[in-house]
Image (cartoon, rainbow, N blue to C red):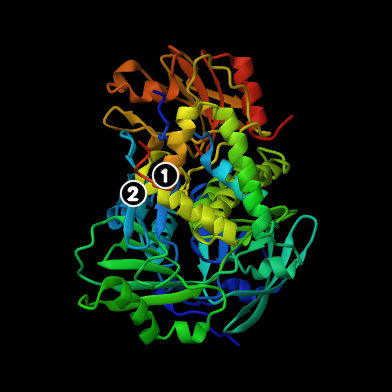
Amino acid sequence: MFQDRYSLAFKLYPYKRSADQDADTPVRHPVVVMGGGPIGVATALDLGLQGIPVVVLDDHEGIGMGSRAICFSKRCLEVADRYGCGEPMLEKGVVWNLGKVFHEDRKVFEFNLLPEEGHKYPAFINLQQPYFEKFIVDRVREAQADGAPIELRGKNRVDSIDVRDDHVVLRVMTPDGAYTLEADWLIGCDGANSPLRSMLGLDFTGRVFKDSFLIADIRMKAEFPTERWFWFEPSHGSGASTLLHKQPDDTWRIDFQIGWDVDRAEEIKEENIRRRLDAMLGPDIEYEMVWSSIYTFQCKRMDRFRHGRVIFAGDAAHQVSPFGARGANSGMQDVDNLGWKLSLVITGKAPESLLDSYDEERIHGADENILNSTRSTDFITPKSAISHIFRNAVLDLAEHYEFARPLVNSGRLSLPCTYDGLSLNGPDALPGGPSRTRVGSPCPDAPVGDGFLLPRLGNDFQILTIGAEAPEMLEEDGVTARRFAISASDDPTGVLAERYLGDASAAVYLIRPDQHVAARWPAFDETAMRTALRKACGKD
Amino acid sequence: MSTLNLKPNIEDPDGFYADLIGAHEGLSDAESAALNARLVLLFANHIGDRDILRKAIKAASNPGKET
């Protein structure tokens, strides 16, 4: 009845019979999350920390083996930090800044991510996905101990659903047999092959790329520096392209592009993986195999992420190629976007239509990610003779001329999108205000006093005043915004002024619970603030 | 003497590259070569400066030895 699809790295929520299984009539929950991956558990954490009861149903009892996603972006870590689990990720993760690009046996050029000062989190960390997930589950356990109404149910597999106008009925299979449960809202975080999507017969459209990649994670005490190395057509012949990336625990991710018409069963054999690894590393390097997998990929998304009372997030809603670290990172941004909106709707403080802005904003994000990821894929795996000629011409020129380097695309590393021109945006009315903090942007971090700005923002609406006056609190139709005031003495480095004032001498920002800018002005105007707050909640 | 600009100068390089490759989609090798020839002539006319064009031809023929 229960066949595990994968083995576990950490068994964290073993099956336990729930009282719901013995109820005479199906128990109704405000939110049920389908899927216990990072996006599902983070969704539960976001809602649970807001006091919204949530049940996660996972057909396994913990976190799957294998490093899978390894590159977590600043914005993703900032979201995790808002949930209280960013710091352990940073502590465990590997920080890297230098990337090198090779063609055949020549180094074409190297680049430095040149980290900008004044952020709590670096541009990226490398961390095996099971650790990333475990830190989120650890935080759930901590939140539960503080009373957050979160339940993680292992070996609870959703076999069928019935979507009604105002709730969803789920038939759930367990080792003790099936039971029925109801949810006001069902969040589908069940991954790229989403069974939920199939149950609803919903389309998932886009491009399939005809290439396969072999991932090998190996453990070795090698002298390779902590850098990202990418080979186009390496002369060691181990693949059409190869990526080497450092992870914690002396573990290295190596990714070989091996072509479309390959015998997967043959390629995944250890001796054949070792043949490629030995060709690349040289014969004298000893290593131990940790994990390997062959994958193909697609760039696809659903037409809409919200279908009445069913909402999709993460890979279930959109899938990208791995180049550029846009999978798990964009899924976390979905959670960041959905959590506060769903909470306002459930508590009756905002109309249900607010959730349509989740669709609008995250489809905007998904399209940007798919565009970038598709372009990287086209560069790495050129699909026609002429595209291959241009790709190699760029590499030849990049070795000698700086101008060609921005054209070399081995993955454009994930940046959060700005919700330019979308429905919830209020006025961008700060003359001289910097472009990076325009309305719709995720707030960039900056030093404030002894700490940082972002840990002070989020979870609720806030009125950020910089050298400006405003009331300490404002309530509009059930939604409150609290003031966070910054004066010149809180910003000794001037970095915050550079990022939030530009040429302006003072500013008032309305910041959303997900740390995006909702509106900005040079001074507080109560009527304008109330109007912007209503708009950001999908009212009027 | 005019200088051939070898510093990054293309706005939205990824978008430009996608347009360039996209223009070749579905073309035969001969058609692609012809498209490239027309493109080179258009770019050359836009540049106009004979000295720059001479250096660009050298740079393309022997990368690293444009002068």
Disc 1 and disc 2 in contact, CB within 8 angstroms:
yes
Which quadrant of the structure image shows residue A22? bottom right
Label 2: chain? Answer: A
Give percent across and percent down for residue A295. Answer: 52, 72
Q: Nearer the viewer, residue A14 or A67?
A: A67
Three-letter amino acid code at the position of disc 1: Arg
Check disc 2 and report its element: helix, strand or loop. strand
Q: Are marks 1 and 2 on the same chain?
A: yes
Q: Quadrant of the N terminus of chain B?
A: top left
Question: Residue visible at 37% across and 63% down?
Answer: A104
- Give residue A195's quadrant in the image: bottom right
Circle number at residue A104: none
Q: Chain of mark 1?
A: A
Q: Is residue A223 left or right of residue A288?
A: left
User: Local crowd at mark 1 within 10 Å, few (<14), some, or many (≥20)?
Assistant: many
Residue A56: x and y in percent read: 56, 64
Q: Is residue A311 visible?
A: no
Of residues A285 and A89, the one nearer the viewer is A285
Q: Which residue is at 36% across, 66% downward?
A: A253
Label 2 amino acid? Answer: Phe
Give the answer, above or below, for where A485 lies relative to A50: above
* Gap in angstroms between the C-alphas marked 1 and 2: 8 Å
Q: Position of residue A197 (x, y in %)?
A: 69, 65
Residue designated by label 1: A405
Q: Dot 2: within a 10 Å radius of its alpha carbon, few (fewer than 14), some, or many (20 or more) residues?
A: some
Q: Which residue is mark 2?
A: A109
